[in-house]
Amino acid sequence: DGGITQSPKYLFRKEGQNVTLSCEQNLNHDAMYWYRQDPGQGLRLIYYSQIVNDFQKGDIAEGYSVSREKKESFPLTVTSAQKNPTAFYLCASSLTGFPRETQYFGPGTRLLVL
Amino acid sequence: RKEVEQDPGPFNVPEGATVAFNCTYSNSASQSFFWYRQDCRKEPKLLMSVYSSGNEDGRFTAQLNRASQYISLLIRDSKLSDSATYLCVAHSGSARQLTFGSGTQLTVLP
């Protein structure tokens, strides 16, 4: 079955720790995205990538980093510089990144700070 | 002012009712619009795209008014399974970015 997988489902971060969230897709999509959702709020874009080895900052990139070494994979690292990381993190992909395309979402990772 | 604004609700309606959600967007350069549905603690899923002429998919009708920068979603004959949060989404005008509203929560009651 084609789709987007995210792991882990739940992740706990200690003070000062970097953590990496995994996102993999087998839809053969060029564009991938990372969003953050806080309770009662809409999704906010962290980073996006339209092609391998290229990515762009979204609206709230500070304290996060990404890489796009393979078409299928777009991992997100939440660094210690992100002071309020507790949120629901959603990865998405679309065919080429053009505005009219549907974005397909993974099941999400809930990050909690200990 | 938020780029995409929605009434957060909650909307509590009986089964079989008709319910309408509204959404306004501030970026007049926005070209594409969508409604996504998000179940509790799950990922958003596309419900329907919104076209200039308006479009219908079964019990769901979406309308776009560019002059007023306003999008609507109408759900007829509500089902219990329609209970979810409905997210209004606009293409922000900058390359490759979508802007999501905060969502409107719907509960359909038996």
Image (cartoon, coloured by chain):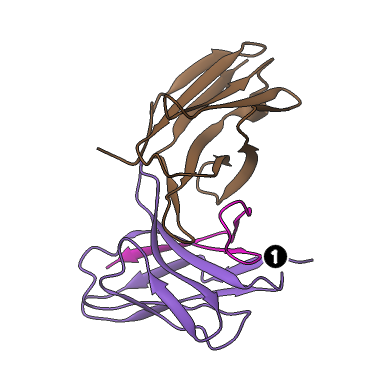
Residue A72, image quadrant: bottom right
- Membership of A101 in magenta stretch: yes
**Residue B9 horizontal side relative to residue A59, left or right:** right
Q: Which residues are magenta?
A: A91-114
Compared to residue A95, the image places residue B105 above or below, namely: above
Residue visible at 20% across and 67% down in the picture: A83
Residue B9's place in the image compared with B35, above or below, is above
The chain to which mark 1 is attached is A
Q: Residue furthest right?
A: A1
User: In the rendered view of the protein, which quadrant contains the C terminus of chain B?
Assistant: top right
Chain identifier matching the brown colour in the rendered picture: B
**Kind of residue at badge 1:** Gly
Which residue is rendered at x = 71% and y = 73% of the image?
A28
Q: Which residue is mark 1?
A: A3
Q: Residue A77, image x and y in percent?
A: 38, 78
> A33 or B92: nearer the eye?
B92
Find residue B46 and report its horizontal and vertical position in percent: 63, 45
Mark 1: which secondary structure? Answer: loop
Q: Position of residue B13 (x, y in %)?
A: 54, 14
- Chain letter for purple, please: A
| Residue B81 pos. (x, y %) | 66, 29
Which residue shows up at 42% across the image and 48% down it?
B99
